Amino acid sequence: MAEETTNPPPAETPAAPKAAPTAKPASPASAGAKPAAAKPAAAKPAGHAAPKGPPLATLTPELVQLQQQFGESVITPAPYVGVLVNDPSKLRDVMTYVRDQLGFDMLANATAVDYIKEGYIEVVYHPQRSKGGQPITLKVRVPRGNDPVAPTEVAVPSLTPIYAGAEFQEREIYDMYGVRFEGHPDLRRILTWEGFYGWPLRKDWHEPYYEGDTKPFDSRWPGGHHELAEERVPWADNVNYPPGFDPLNFNANPDAGLYDTMISGVPGVEEIASNGHAQRSPQFKGVGAAVPVLDRNYNNLADEEELQTDQIIVNMGPQHPSTHGVLRMVVKLDGETVTDLKLVLGYLHRNHEKIGERNTWLHNIPYTDRLDYICGIANELGYVITVEKMMGIKPTERAEYLRVIMTELTRIESHFWAIGFLLNDLGAFYTPALYFITERDLILDLFESVTGSRLMCNYMRFGGVSRDLTEDQLMHARQLAFDRIPRKIDELEQLLTDNEIIKARTIGVGYLPADRSINYSLTGPCLRAAGVPYDIRRVDPYSIYDRFDFEIPVFYGADVYDRYRVRVAEMRQSLRIVQQALNQLDQTKPGDIQAGKKAYNHRVPAGEAYGRVETPKGELGFYLVSDGGQNPYRYHVRSSSFINLNSLKEMTVGHKVADAVVILGSLDIVLGEVDR
Amino acid sequence: MGLMGTGILKGLGVTLRHFIDTYAEDLKYILNKSGVQQPRPLRRQSPKNRGLVTVEYPRERLPLPENFRYIPFLVYDTEKQDDKCTSCGICAKVCPPQCIWIVRTEDPVTKRPVPQPKEFYIDTTICMNCGYCAEFCPFDAIKMDHDYELSYYPNQEPSARLVHDKARLTKPDTYHASIHPTDWRRELEDRAAEEAKKKAAAEAKAKADAAKVSGGAAPSGAPPAAKPAPAAKPAAPAAKPAASKSSAEPAADAPAAPSDAAQAGESQ
């Protein structure tokens, strides 16, 4: 347990005394260009007397205003970026002020970092304005404790009353770090199963077959012992069982807590808690006690009593054609009407973030492909620009254009896929889907011939891309962008947009108005279908999107039909961008695709950054903390699919069960990104 | 809002068009066919195609693009009769799932490492085909393969299994040249350029030596020409077994190994 982390905490300077023979401090020249890197440097002289502490952030005007409002004892500058809310009990007041007075009406991201050496867990919030601009960073610290099972003693107030979008994210933090959230309506584990032993993202939690905190592992070279990974049995090595665990009498009921929150007629909160946990194995008491079921406002008890109808709970999934993968929707039905809905996630959970913290910065690029495997290149772009922001490097012109071309083609193919499968969900089984998959495959042909793979492209590099397009490949891209795909989008609209059956099934279904959408942190086409012109390519431009002439399509129906129409309109806009980029590509130097020398062991200056891009599904953010080493200290993915699912319940309740399938389809989730 | 049902009719028109287009493509193919025995011409979906194209997979295979990447293989230099790999270990370090194991060869006498792998394993069950090993190998010694059918029966011999050892991984550079013609051309050019550079450097050195010698004593072409070879040898920290190696070329490669690696690592 008392494994020593080889990672120095972020307090260390970039020139950490790591054993690597090439340990060379990050060149000071690279630390100047970008704000994330420049800020700490600028703030250093202003810092307190503490000689070894990390540099404190310089505050933006909003944060200064916040500090004036709540006093300098409550709000202090945090290391590197943002402010620290020193008193967790004031967090709700602060956040209410942030939302109502400062206008940061959307919680973009909430996550945590385990600073094991300092002995606290830092919960990090990134609220942003739905009008656009950079998010601000607020942090809260709670002592982490050394108990491997118990959650933190000090609870953080839940932000769910302020930002509905915090619900899943707080559950994730609870699940991964064991941070308790006071006042959360349904604080259960979300990605791991109920009864999981330990808090997987804490730095002292080690997975089976743990080899080391960071890659590359020493055992691989020069004289390591090879083995076939598939022959490993998962329970063989380094598995931590709870004390007193008896596998023969193992009787965890992981669904007890879930059904408790859905079954009506259970009187009080305390009783639920005790009943729910009494059904489980007594060995799991420690874990069970960590599951407060506090708020019961999910159930509409009054209706049930008046109508005297029976309600049943139906599990859709995890293996179900309508759930787009291994997602389980637990719906409570009154007849055919959905009265409550809960999601069970995590069937595809592989602790992507833990893997990401073991990996070097470069290793992570192909892993991001596996997040949302429908649009891998867009994920890579998000990660790469975040790291570039921290390293202060800039890709070459040609690489920028190639990035935009590939990313926008990814958007088109992803929307083809989304619309095709929305039609599947509507019952038009596979005929339209296959028409669109044909077009998607033509785009994937291009990806395959350029990058070597159709889905797992691994195309981006820090400071560039991996390959240039040859003349043949450019011709293929031009044929697609100028001729084939515009024609096919017209055909798609001809096939679907006026279809009366589609209109009858989708108009008014899955309604979620703009203010609720924002409150739920909904992003992507679903938010734009509710009339909010929020697209990161426009509100906080990255890469070279400010050079292109394109529009952000917005519809106002906030229903499934408009989500479909937004996607079609977005494909046309993406085509415009691709066409412009292909035309302007001639002005750049062929082959000039990598800034600087190609390297494999990057060192990123100590600091942290939150970078985001607009993927086809919504806002994909990466929250990275570097301690100056070869590996990220914290690697968090703000996944749009995961956070968009927050709002599924509110969209679905009141509709028929068949509509629940369509509404889920209209959100366009990919489980690889939901579960990570 | 148009007449009820016009939207559906419009959509059905699209379906009909797809139906006709697909058969029109097939009709073209039937009319072109000269005899029954002739294999069907392989067509790939292209932006110009209409309708749907079916490829009957196990019987027909689509041509793979050159950049296509699957499980890596080691390149064997048929010209020099030697592995190109020098066991520098960069591939094992850049491998994201850490599926490469290398055992270095030791000189049996001096116990010093020889730049050649004794063992080389890739666990293909966890290889993610990212292509980093091939991309970052400074010696063009590991390349991504086009062979994507790796399944085996449990009763097959262990060499067919999914931890590929050195014997299974090694493939001749002629094979590499056949599946990666562009890459191979680039390699040849690089090699030619390097040799030219080396030659030029040797000549320059010879000239300088000659000048030095001529400054002191009687000029002669022979001693300076012989000089560079012995000079290169002590510089190599890991002398290769003399029997298998031809001469200056691989010996000059050896010192290049660590320095290249360090250089690639140090930048940024």
Image (cartoon, coloured by chain):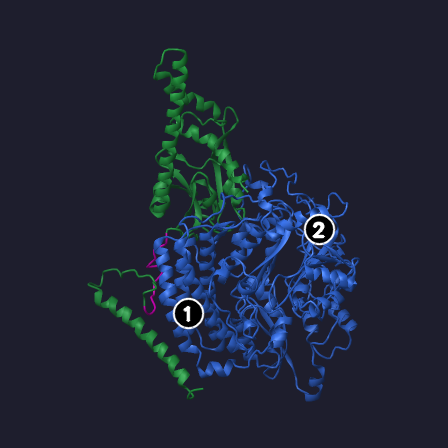
The residue depicted at 43 percent of the width and 71 percent of the height is A433
Chain drawn in blue: A
Question: Which subunit holds the residue at mark 1?
Answer: A
Extent of the magenta region: B50-65
Q: Is residue B78 left or right of residue A277?
A: left
At label 2, which amino acid type do we have? Leu
* Nearer to us in this view, B243 or A69: A69
Colour assigned to chain B in the rendering is green
At label 1, which amino acid type do we have? Phe
Separation of marks 2 and 1 at Cα, in angstroms: 51 Å
Pick whichever of labels 2 and 1 is earlier in the sequence. Answer: 2
Image spot of residue A45 (x, y percent):
71, 46
* Nearer to us in this view, A599 or B166: A599
Q: Are marks 2 and 1 in contact (CB under 8 Å)?
A: no
* Nearer to us in this view, A438 or A489: A489
For disc 2, the marked residue is A56
Image spot of residue B85 (x, y percent):
45, 37
Within the magenta stretch, is there residue B55?
A: yes
- What label does residue A436 carry, if any? 1
